Image (cartoon, rainbow, N blue to C red):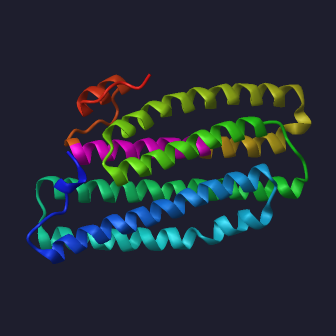
Amino acid sequence: MDRSHFGQHSSSQFNDEMESIRSHLMEMGGLVEKQVIDALQSLLQADSELAERVLENEDKVDSLEKLIDGECARVLALRQPAASDLRMIISVTKCVSDLERIGDEAAKVAKMSLELAEQGESPRGYVEVRHIGNHVRTMLGDALDAFARFDVQKAVDVAAEDNEVDLEYRSAMRALVTFMMEDPRSISSVLNIIWSLRALERIGDHAKNIAEQLIYMVKGKDVRHISVDEVARHADVSRPK
């Protein structure tokens, strides 16, 4: 199903309301994506000013969350949408929640960046941060692009990528724990890296959730808590390699 099947009604006001919701969701997605990019950069480059900017922008994310929730509530109350429009509203409300939580995780990374900058060290783990950070940043961008384009195949690809991030995260944790055991003096700084990696891994989880909501919106299939092979089958697309 392409996007032309959504939000096209005889009521131009209803069309405008649905388009406003989609537009604000994409605006929120773009802002949150920038938060993730800036938080990662602030950590890798010990940029305290950029980290502070990430924290300052949290209010903008929260304001958009409340705005979109209000718009969705009004459409549900006044328009009583059915079928694909109802699925779109439900998916948007869930995506908004995931985006807000991604913003929270980006803020955690920014706070860790500030602590590490104060310590003035370059602790072990930055390679892992860069690798996993770039991976989840790409996942988030692809999930938002899939939602904007109603691209089910790309959404399934994002869901598959989350498994790879989980493997990378567990591998990084083992390496960092071993490093702390060998050098107890590193514990404080490496713990900050571990918390940052945990936040990045959670961002990947939320990006996967957004992709799953797009599949639900387009296909009407709830693909949460099932394998990637099953997700691809329900979505009627090919399994990512």
Above or below, comparing residue 166 to residue 118 in the picture: above
Q: Main secondary structure of the magenta part?
A: helix
Query: In screen coordinates, is 189 left or right of 209?
Result: right
Above or below, comparing residue 17 to residue 36 in the picture: below
Is 107 one of the magenta-colored residues? no
What percent of the width, then of the height, locates residue 45? 80, 53
Residue at figure coordinates x 29%, y 42% from the top left: 215
Residue at figure coordinates x 46%, y 74% from the top left: 63
What percent of the width, then of the height, locates residue 50? 73, 64
What percent of the width, then of the height, locates residue 226? 33, 29
Q: Quadrant of residue 228?
A: top left
Q: Is residue 79 visible?
A: yes
Query: In screen coordinates, is 88 left or right of 98?
Result: left
Query: In screen coordinates, is 203 left or right of 195?
Result: left
Is 205 one of the magenta-colored residues? yes
What percent of the width, then of the height, locates residue 2? 23, 48
Above or below, comparing residue 103 to residue 232 in the picture: below
- Position of the N terminus by quadrant: top left
Magenta stretch: give its range: 200-218
Above or below, comparing residue 234 to residue 203 in the picture: above
